Amino acid sequence: MSSLFRYTRAVVCGVPSSLPANALRQNSDIDNISLEKARLQHKKYVDTLKSLGLQVTALEANEEHPDCVFVEDVAVVCENEALITRLGHSSRRGEEKAMKNALEKLGLRIHEMSAPASLDGGDVLFTGREFFVGLSSRTNQEGITKLSEVFSKYPVHGIAVEKHLHLKSMMTMVWDDTIVVGESEPAQKAWAEIKNTASFQYKCVTVPEDKAANCLIVNGTVVHLVSEEIPKSVEKFRQLSCPKIELSNSELHKVDGCLTCLSIFIE
Ligand code: CIR
């Protein structure tokens, strides 16, 4: 049984109607997004968290912020501390207000970040022992420095992210000491940098599709994408001996949303 990644609560946010037309996206050449399907997939995600024993606080969708469903980016929570981020894309700034209120109400100690620092939570990989933080188009060195001040008891390492939106678009924890990493060249390069800088040794599961490398571990269960979305990689998850749940995320993935970006977990 995994002893890390045990949580009692999660914070999520609804999917706004403004998302299909206005959410940020790396690839503008994508299929239409079905709002109805996105909301249904998001509901199943929230129901899954509840089924894993979490009490879920749901923030109301904010139409002025088409990307507000991606709550992972606006805060980094570890133990009793919450760092409210200054989002890397200026159009998303303001999303953090609702999260700050919610985390304050839940009794977390709040820290804030000011310019020129910027950081998206999607760049923050916490292994339970140390932080790896993507230096990406959204997260800068000042953001990483602020994170290391707030979570000063853990080592913090910056990792170059060249092509992907975030570090966790290509790797996440899949068990206490194991990281699942995409097979692409940029993902493997980032993994090599992690191996070189890490204070601990991690095992690695490599998956052929980078998007498969974004999964959740919640209270001993691994939550990953359904086989239709990761046909070449699903077998790697089937080989894990822990409990597993599969979820669809086809619609939010069109605007670069992964499974981790839809929630903030609280221990
Ligand atoms: C953005 O570009 O900011 C959103 N469309 C997607 C954010 C995804 N966040 C995440 O993976 N942590």
Image (cartoon, rainbow, N blue to C red):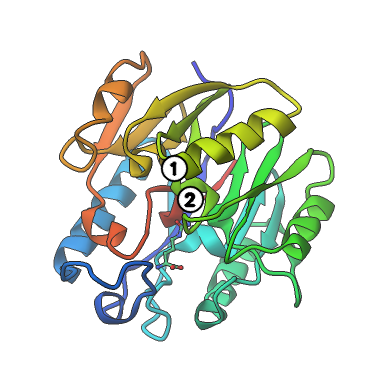
Q: Quadrant of ligand 1?
A: bottom left
- Camera-side residue: 245 or 91? 91
**Amino acid type of the residue tagged 1 in the rendering:** Leu
Q: Which residue is mark 1?
A: 54
- Camera-side residue: 84 or 109? 84
Q: Secondary structure at mark 2?
A: strand
Q: Which residue is mark 2?
A: 10
Q: Secondary structure at mark 1?
A: loop
- Mark 2 or mark 1: whose residue is earlier in sequence: 2
Q: Is residue 235 visible?
A: yes
Q: Is residue 127 visible?
A: no
- Camera-side residue: 155 or 243? 155
Q: Percent from the top left, x then y, of residue 204?
A: 50, 23
Q: Is residue 191 left or right of residue 140?
A: left
Residue for point 84% across, 54% down:
149
Separation of marks 2 and 1 at Cα, in angstroms: 6 Å
**Amino acid type of the residue tagged 2 in the rendering:** Ala
Tell me: residue 169, above or below residue 195.
Answer: below
Q: Is residue 118 left or right of residue 223?
A: right
Residue for point 54% across, 75% down:
89
Dot label at residue 3: none
Residue for point 59% across, 71% down:
88
